[in-house]
Image: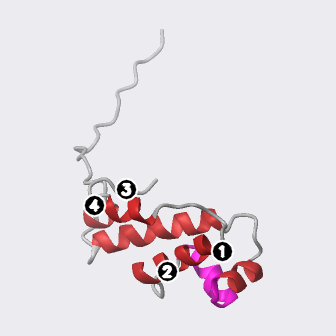
Amino acid sequence: MKAKLKAPSSPDVETGSRNVFADLGLPDPDDRRLRVQLAMRLIDLLEGMSQAAAAKRLGISRPHVSGLKRFKLARFSSKRLLHLTRRIQQAGDTSMSTVRLRSMSVGERHCG
């Protein structure tokens, strides 16, 4: 006869706000979330490019591209990330709709 294992008691589970930065109590959670979303989009647009090529195309240094690709976003404002995304768009590399991004409510924006 097998012994029955008792499941360990689990802590109460709370539903998150869809913004991990707000859930963690970090300052400026909406801006942090927006910067991550913009960085994710920009990284997708740069896929297949070397860091040197991406740096040249964006007009930033290769170490900044490296930081961007590793989500080291302290030096990137949401405005700067949007500018970099538009720069890629204007080069004809993609057709991201910045109007759609701006028109989304904060509640609709979420990571992943």
Image position, residue 89 (x, y; %): 59, 70
Numbered badge on residue 106: 4
Is 45 displayed left or right of 18 in the figure?
right
Q: Is residue 27 above or below residue 36?
A: below
- What residue do we see at 46% from left, 76% from top? 82
Numbered badge on residue 110: 3
Query: Which label's residue is closer to the chain start, 1 or 4?
Result: 1
Label 2 crowd bin: few (<14), some (14–19), many (20+), radius 10 Å: few
Between circles 2 and 4, the one closer to the viewer is: 2
Image position, residue 33 (x, y; %): 37, 67
Label 4 crowd bin: few (<14), some (14–19), many (20+), radius 10 Å: few
Report if residue 20 is visible in the image.
Answer: yes
Is 100 displayed left or right of 51 in the figure?
left
Which corner quadrant of the image does residue 74 belong to? bottom left
Image position, residue 35 (x, y; %): 42, 72
- What residue do we see at 58% from left, 78% from top? 87
- What residue do we see at 63% from left, 89% from top? 60
Query: Which label's residue is closer to the chain start, 2 or 4?
Result: 2
Q: Is residue 36 above or below residue 15?
A: below
Query: Which label's residue is closer to the chain start, 1 or 3?
Result: 1
Q: Which residues are magenta?
A: 58-71
Q: Which residue is mark 2?
A: 83
Q: Which residue is mark 1?
A: 91
Is 27 displayed left or right of 61 in the figure?
left
Amino acid beneath label 1: Ala
Task: Say if mark 3 contacts mark 4, CB within 8 Å.
Answer: no
Report if residue 69 is visible in the image.
Answer: no
Numbered badge on residue 77: none
Label 3 crowd bin: few (<14), some (14–19), many (20+), radius 10 Å: some
